[in-house]
Image (spheres, rainbow, N blue to C red):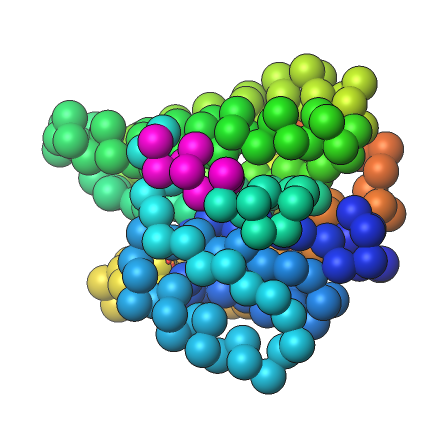
Amino acid sequence: MTAATGGTNPVVLITGAGQGIGAAITRRFAEQGAKLALVDVNAEQLKQLTDSLKDYDVEILPLSADVSNKEQVGQLVRQVVEKFGRIDVLINNAGIIRDNLISNISEQDWDQVLDVNLKGAFLCCQAVFPTLKTQRYGKIVNIVSRAWLGSIGQANYTASKGGLVSLTRSLALEFARFQINVNAVAPGAIDSPMTQGLPAEARERLIRMQPTGKMGKVEDIAAAVAFLASDDSEFITGQVLHVDGGKSCGLLSL
Ligand SMILES: NC(=O)c1ccc[n+]([C@@H]2O[C@H](COP(=O)([O-])OP(=O)(O)OC[C@H]3O[C@@H](n4cnc5c(N)ncnc54)[C@H](O)[C@@H]3O)[C@@H](O)[C@H]2O)c1
């Protein structure tokens, strides 16, 4: 597996970089010497992450912004281009959950999840497109979820991630002629602050449901993202790479 090759030190824009999977993706690209534009709505987390990267000799542009806000997304993309002159890789990773059975999903919980997970990725793809098109080069990786296939108690989340799979496939077709690849990584249950926040019983049930009997690591997702952001995947576009220990293959039966 080689590093992303939008030049020697690719410019990589990562949303939801502050913790969990986003922070692992950030570390992975830092190891490769990338120039990093790190976006998170939580400024404090972003600061902690940036401080933790001091040992890597890489340029970092921390950007505190909400990906569901069109104005903020436009502004942050302008800042990235101003500082680095180009964008090679966009990782749409920012995501939230507001789990509930359908009868208990409030309109607000529906809107928030769709706004961050789906509209946020749309806004970022739209905002970087003119730059990628001019370059005739770009890699977009959308972080979806194994749950896009269906999951009880997550109708808002699965709809957002299913929508993001469709967005990935459509943009792959629209952007192919400009040498821009658009792919998705679908994590299964991953040990991150998102799943650490679940009630203990729900977390144990989740682990029991895994074919491997354990959760994946944030680094497992970062490795798949690195592949799809590299030129080793040049002829792969519009695809969903499940990184889920086999969970998407079917039900576990005794
Ligand atoms: N952890 C899992 O098991 C799992 C499984 C499947 C998919 N995913 C997906 O992976 C991605 C990362 O998940 P995670 O587990 O690291 O989650 P996390 O909650 O640990 O981290 C998400 C990050 O996104 C940031 N964020 C939230 N809303 C934002 C917004 N509007 N604008 C900018 N930043 C925002 C948060 O501040 C946080 O730093 C998400 O898209 C999630 O849906 C996670």
Q: Residue at x 73, y 67 (%)?
A: 32
In percent of width and height, residue 211 lies at 57, 57
Between 205 and 231, the residue placed more toward the observer is 231
Q: Quadrant of residue 70?
A: top left
Q: Position of residue 251 (x, y in %)?
A: 53, 42
Quarter of the image for residue 161 reads top left
The answer to whether residue 69 is above or below residue 7 is: above
- Answer yes or no: is residue 148 visible: no
| Residue that sits furthest to the front in the current view | 82
Q: Measured along the vertical axis of the image, is residue 36 above or below residue 150? A: below
Q: Is residue 214 left or right of residue 176?
A: left
Highlighted range, magenta: 71-78
User: Is 105 above or below relative to 166?
Assistant: below
Residue drawn at the location 50% of the way across and 64% of the way down:
23
Name the quadrant of the N terminus: bottom right
Main SS of the magenta segment? helix
Q: Residue at x 34, y 31 (%)?
A: 71
